[in-house]
Image: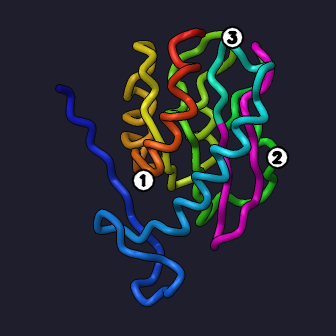
Amino acid sequence: MRQLIVRWATTLPLSDPTVVNYKNERLLMHEQFMLRALHISKNALPSCTPNPPVGCVLVRNGEILSEGFTQAIGGNHAEVEAFNAYSGSFDDVTAYITLEPCSFTGRTPACTSMILKSGIKRVEVAMLDPDPRNSGKGIQILIQAGINVRVGLCDSDVAKFLTPYLGKS
């Protein structure tokens, strides 16, 4: 089994009463934002098929800056929609994405390239993309570029919804 190395530098203060300790991380706020990304991903259906319905939320200091979901086939992926909808600095911004960003060019450019160009430094991903063209490659590209990435936030909730749509594009 391949081991995936994941880095994360948390910025939440230890005394913050709005978060709880889960798997040695302070995640309650993070979970709320990933669940928001999951909620908006449902707006992608049915027009996004055969691509999976993905959601992305950009957050700074507990405030949602922008959101995006996968567009109709050949249109923007969720990450591109969210990043395009936000025009400010990416300092201290975290992206919450329900599925690993694509690392290959198909009908659209690779989302990892756009993420790298943005200058964002933190990305939360619910689950890896099982597509053999991606399958951990997107995460590795982000990590190698110095982005702090964590995989697995709300993974069971996201997988329950997303799994039936995977492997069809």
- Which residue is drawn at the image coordinates 64% and 33% (left, top)? 54
Secondary structure found at label 2: loop
Q: What amino acid is at disc 2? A: Ala
Q: Residue furthest left?
A: 1
Q: What amino acid is at disc 1? A: Asn
- Which residue is drawn at the image coordinates 61% and 58% (left, top)? 33
Secondary structure found at label 1: strand
The residue beneath circle 3 is: 107
Which range is magenta? 55-74
Marks 3/2: CA distance?
21 Å
The residue beneath circle 1 is: 148
How busy is the neighbourhood of tag 2: few (under 14 within 10 Å), some, or many (20 plus)? some
How busy is the neighbourhood of tag 1: few (under 14 within 10 Å), some, or many (20 plus)? many
Query: Which scheme is used to colour this image of the protein?
Result: rainbow
Marks 3/1: CA distance?
28 Å
The reply to whether callout 3 and callout 2 are in contact (CB within 8 Å) is: no
Q: Position of residue 149 (x, y in %)?
A: 42, 49
- Magenta part, dominant SS: strand
Residue 64 on the magenta span: yes
Marks 2/1: CA distance?
22 Å
The disc, 3 or 2, on the residue closer to the chain's N-terminal end is: 2
The disc, 3 or 1, on the residue closer to the chain's N-terminal end is: 3
Q: Quadrant of the N terminus?
A: top left
The residue beneath circle 2 is: 85
The disc, 2 or 1, on the residue closer to the chain's N-terminal end is: 2
Q: What amino acid is at disc 3? A: Arg
Place residue 132 in its image quadrant.
top left
